[in-house]
Image (cartoon, rainbow, N blue to C red):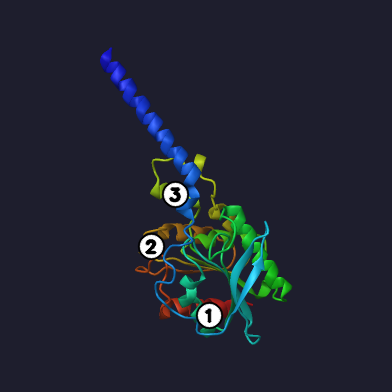
Amino acid sequence: MKLRQVFLYVFLSLAILYACVCTYMYIFQRNFLYLPEQNNNLRGEKLNLEIKEISVPSTENITLKAWFYNNPKNKYTVLFFHGNAGGLEKRIYKLNEFKNLNLNYLIISWRGFSGNKGSPTEQGLYSDARSALEWLEKNNISKNKIILYGESLGTGVAVEVAQNQKFAGIILESPYTSIVDAAKIYYPYLPVDLILKDKYLSLKKIKNINSPILIMHGGADIIIPIAMGKKLFDEVQSKKYGYFPQFDRHMMTYNSELKLELQKFIKTLN
């Protein structure tokens, strides 16, 4: 009888502990997903051209810090959706290459990032992205001249916005099939399907993209496995291009090979 009571006590204790862990993760999960203060511009690069720092109005009376570069001679404008960590400065090494590709760009910082008001959520980021798109259109830049560029977390935003629209092109760097799938890698002991708030279900949405798409993913990515990028690639129904270097990591290296792939993709756009 005593042994049975001990087993029951241990079982109940573990059950309570597990419930506490699940509750904690449910309440604080966004602190693990969105990291606005992390790793901001460790490279120390500076912008190689003059940009306008602007404020893009979004929903809930939130304005977004953004950088805008516009050369009237350039045909396309990149709308850049960055990942889950750091601010605009962390992407300078990529933005500097857009000049050499004859691309204009608008890069926004999400709500809760770079001093913006609000807290990041899936629906909030979708609203921020659509607000940036509206800003471009109000400034006479139409969708057929816009290339959506999603980086890491931003790939899920790009996929959402791109659905059933006709953009000049879509670029996804280090994408995931869903945050649900990604979270299961890190937290296999949690009921992720039940407690996750922000799911970013890219795999279910990718078939709804009608625009040409380039998917880039490194084989040495230890944050999001390359298999996710390739799985998305397989599901794309529109004109598609892939770049899957074996040794590249999550934040991909803008070397000559990658820049050539970007250049080739841009040349295919109408």
Q: Residue at x 58, y 77 (%)?
A: 268
Q: Residue at x 41, y 38 (%)?
A: 21
Above-or-below relation of 152 to 123: below
Q: Earlier in the sequence, mark 1 or mark 3?
A: 1
Residue 79 showing in the rendered view: no
Above-or-below relation of 32 to 143: above
Q: Which residue is mark 2?
A: 221
Q: Nearer the viewer, mark 3 or mark 2?
A: 3
Q: Which residue is mark 1?
A: 98
Farthest residue to the left: give it: 3
Q: Position of residue 227 (x, y in %)?
A: 42, 58
Tell me the kind of residue under disc 3: Ala
Above-or-below relation of 197 to 59: above
Badge 1: residue crowd in 10 Å (few <14, some 14–19, many ≥20): some
Q: Between 161 and 262, which is closer to the camera in this rendering?
A: 161
Provide the secondary structure element on which disc 1 rests. Answer: helix
Mark 1 touching mark 2, by CB under 8 A?
A: no
Q: Position of residue 214 (x, y in %)?
A: 52, 69
Cα–Cα span, label 1 and label 3: 32 Å
Q: Between 117 and 109, which is closer to the camera in this rendering?
A: 117
Tell me the kind of residue under disc 1: Phe
In this rendering, would 142 be left or right of 102? right
Q: How many marks?
A: 3
Q: Nearer the viewer, mark 1 or mark 2?
A: 1
Q: Position of residue 213 (x, y in %)?
A: 56, 68
Which of the labelled discs sits on residue 89, or is there none?
Answer: none
Q: Earlier in the sequence, mark 1 or mark 2?
A: 1
Q: Which residue is mark 3?
A: 183
